[in-house]
Amino acid sequence: MNPSDGAETPAPTAGRHRWSRRWALWALLVTLLAALLSTLVWLAGRYESSQVQSRMEQDVVQTATDIRGALTRNVQSMQALQASSPGPEAWRVPATELLHAHREIMRLEWRDMALATVSHVETPYRLSVFERLGRDNTQADVGFACAAARRFSGPAYSTSYFLPQADGLGLEVLDMCLPVSTAGRLAGYLVATYSLPDMLSELAGRQLTRGQGLAFTEADGTRLAMHGNPARGSRAYVAQHLLDLPGNTMVLRLERQVGTPALFPNLLTALVAAMSIALVAVLALLGRDMRRRLKVEHDLADALAFRKAMEDSLVTGMRARDLQGRVTYVNPAFCQMVGLEARELLRHSMPPPYWPPELAEEYQQRQASRLAVGATLPREGFESVFMRRDGSRFPVLIIEAPLINAVGKQTGWMSAILDVSEQRRIEELSRASQDRLQATARLATVGEMASLLSHELNQPLAAISSYATGSLNLLQSAAAEAQPADNSEGLQLAMRRIAEQAERAGKVIKSVHDFVRRREQVREPIAPRLLLDAVMPLVSLQARKLGVRVLMQVDESCAPVLCDRTMVEQVLLNLARNGMQAMQGLDKSRRFDRVLILRVRAAASNAYSRWVEFAVIDHGEGIPEEVARRLFTPFFTTKAEGMGLGLSLCRTVIEQHGGFLGFEPMQPQGTIFTFTLPVAVTVAMSHEAATG
Ligand code: ADP
C-alpha cells in the first residue's frame, strides 16, 4: 500500500465527522428552540384560559348572590303587600302592581290556612301559565313548599316543575310559599310562582355579557332554564355555583364559548409568538452567517494548503525574519540548503547558525543597516556566503522585501535565497574551457604553420649549409695550396652569411615561440602598428607560400589601444590567414589581384570612448549568403583541414574587449573584416599632449 494513503485517509474522515457533528448540534438547537417556543405558547394560552375561568368563577358567585338578594327583596315586597291586610279584592291592586314590577313572577296567590286560594293575580306579560295544565295539578308542590315554609317560619321554595304552554313550548317554574301571620298568628300563605327563565333574565341577565349563557341545572346537570347563548360542544368555559334556597337547591351555571379557536388568543401569547418568530429569524440569520463563515473557512483552508504546497515545492529558499532579525519562518528548501532543521532555525538567537563565524560581525552590521525600517533594498538582491551544518561555505543570492501584515504594518522581512554555488561552478568551468579552447586554437594555428615553418627554415638552412660547404671547400683548397691569407676574406663573408641566415632562422622560430608562449592576460596600451608588426612575420610566411602580397595602411595618428596583446594578435592572424586562403582559388591570370590589405584608422567615437578600427581586406571569392549566416557558429568550416573555430573565437575576444567584429563584401570582389578596439584613455591623452 502506498504510505501516503495512510496519511491522507484520516483528514477527510475527520472533516466528515466534524461536519456531521456540527449538523447534529444545529438540529438539537433547533429542536430545543421549537420545543421551548411551543411550550411558551401553550403556557401562555393556558394562563389566559385560567384567567378567563377564574373571572367566570367570580362572576357566577356574584350572580348567585344577586339572584338570592333579588329574591329576598321580592319576599320583603310581598310581606309589605300583606302587612296592610286588606280584603281579597283590595289586595289585587297592589298585587297586580307588584307583578308589573317583577316580570319573573308569573302568578301571585293568597291562600288560606287550608291552602285554598283566597285571591290571585296573573302576570300581565303572559297568558296564564297554568292554562293548559291547570293549577290544581300542582297542588302537591305548593303543599310541600308551604309545609316547609311553616316549618321555617319564612319563605320556602318548591322543587321546579314543568308547565306545558299553549304555544307548544313549556316553562320550568317553581313556587315560593310565604307564611302570612296576623298579630303573631299564622293567617295564610302567599304563593308566588316564579318562571325560571325569567328569573335568569330579570334577576341576573343584565350583567350577562355577549357570548355568555346562564342556566339553572339540577345537580345531575339536567338543564332547567337557560338565558343567553348556550355553549355548544366541549370547548367552553363553564363555572357553576350552588344556588341554595330554603327548600330547593339548584345549580347556577355560567357558560362561555371559547370562540373560534384562535392561534394567538391574547396579547401575551401574541407577544410570545412574535418573539418566537423573531428568535427563529435570528437563528436563521445566524445559520446563514455560520454557513458563510464555514465557506470562508473552507476557502481559507484551501488557499493555505495551496500556499503550503507551493512553498514546499519551491527550490528557492524562503526565510522570514522579525524586526530584530530573528528567523520566524523557513521553507523546506531553505532547510535543505543549510542542512538544518526548521526548529533549529526558528527564533534562534543572533547570530543564526548558518552565518560563517568569521563573517558574523560583518553580517551583523550589514543586517543592522539593511533591516532598518525604511531602508530601500536592491531589487536585484545581494550576494552573501552561508555555512552548511558540516561547516562548508556556499555562495547565495538574497532578495529581500519588507513583510507587511494585514493592517499594513511592517512586521519583518521576507527573503528569497538562491544557492548560486552551482552557477559559480559552471561559470568557472566555462571560463576555463574558453581559455583551453583558445589555447587549442592557437596550437592548431601553430600546427598549420609547422609545414610553412619547415619550408621557411629550409631556405636559411640550405643557405647555411651551402655557405658552410663553400667555406669548407675554401679551407680544404687553402690547406692543399698553402695560401691561407687569400681565403680569409672569403671565409669571413661566408661565416657572416651563415650567422645572418642562422639569425633569420632563429627569428622565424622565435616568432612562433613568442606567439605560443605568451600567456599572461593583461590589458595594456599598445600602438596599433606594433600589433601588426608582431603578426607580420607569421603572415608573411603564409603569404609567401600562397603568393600573396601584404600591404599595410596604418594611420600613424591613431592612439594606442587597450587590449590583451596575444589575443588581438591571434585575431589579426586568423583574419589574415582566412583572407589569404580565400584568394587561393583565384586563377593564375589574376595573380596581381592577390593583395591582402591590413588597415588601421580611427573609428567613429562618442563622448565617453574613442575607438580604433582594424580592417583585413582580401580580394578573394567572397562569402556566399548561406555561409554568411553560419559564419560565427563554432566548428562551422568549408575547408577540408579547417577547425571552424577561428571566427567564433575572434568575435568572443573582440567582444570581451568591448569592441565589435563584423564583415561586409568588398567591391568588386572579396570581403572586408573589421573590428574595433577601445583607445587607452589616459595614455591617449598624454600621447596627444606629447605630440600636440
Ligand atoms: P576555418 O578557417 O578553420 O574554416 P573560420 O571560423 O576562421 O574557420 O572560418 C569559417 C569559414 O568562414 C571558413 O571555412 C570560410 O568558408 C569562411 N571564411 C572566413 N573568412 C573568409 C574570407 N575572408 N573570405 C571567404 N570566406 C571566408
Image: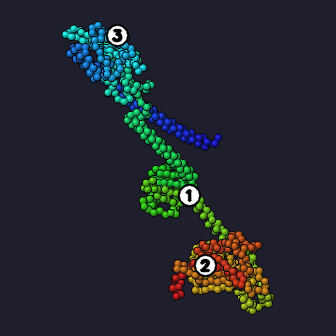
Observer-nearest of 687 and 322: 322
Per the rendering, the mark at residue 676 is 2
Type of residue at label 3?
Gln
Mark 2 in CB contact with mark 1 (< 8 angstroms):
no
Q: Is residue 216 left or right of residue 302?
A: left
Q: Secondary structure at mark 1?
A: strand
Question: Could you tell me which quadrant the N terminus lies in?
Answer: top right
Q: Residue furthest left?
A: 183
Identify the residue shown where x is 61% and y is 81%.
613
Observer-nearest of 93 and 274: 93
Q: Position of residue 664 (x, y in %)?
A: 67, 79
Observer-nearest of 171 and 38: 171
Identify the residue shown where x is 74% and y is 90%.
490
Type of residue at label 1?
Asp
Q: Is residue 641 left or right of residue 679?
A: right
Quarter occupied by residue 521: bottom right
Residues at marks 1 and 3, CA–CA distance in whole angstroms: 133 Å
Q: Secondary structure at mark 3?
A: helix
**Ligand 1 rendered quadrant:** bottom right
Q: Position of residue 373 (x, y in %)?
A: 42, 59
Identify the residue shown where x is 79% and y is 90%.
481
Q: Nearer the viewer, mark 1 or mark 3?
A: 3
Q: Mark 2: give few (<14), some (14-19) or many (20+) Cα within 10 Å.
A: many
Mark 1 highlights which residue?
A: 419
Per the rendering, the mark at residue 384 is none
Mark 3 in CB contact with mark 2 (< 8 angstroms):
no
Mark 1 in CB contact with mark 3 (< 8 angstroms):
no
Observer-nearest of 138 and 384: 138
Mark 3 highlights which residue?
A: 139
User: Looking at the image, is 121 positioned above or below residue 210?
Assistant: above
Identify the residue shown where x is 54% and y is 53%.
334
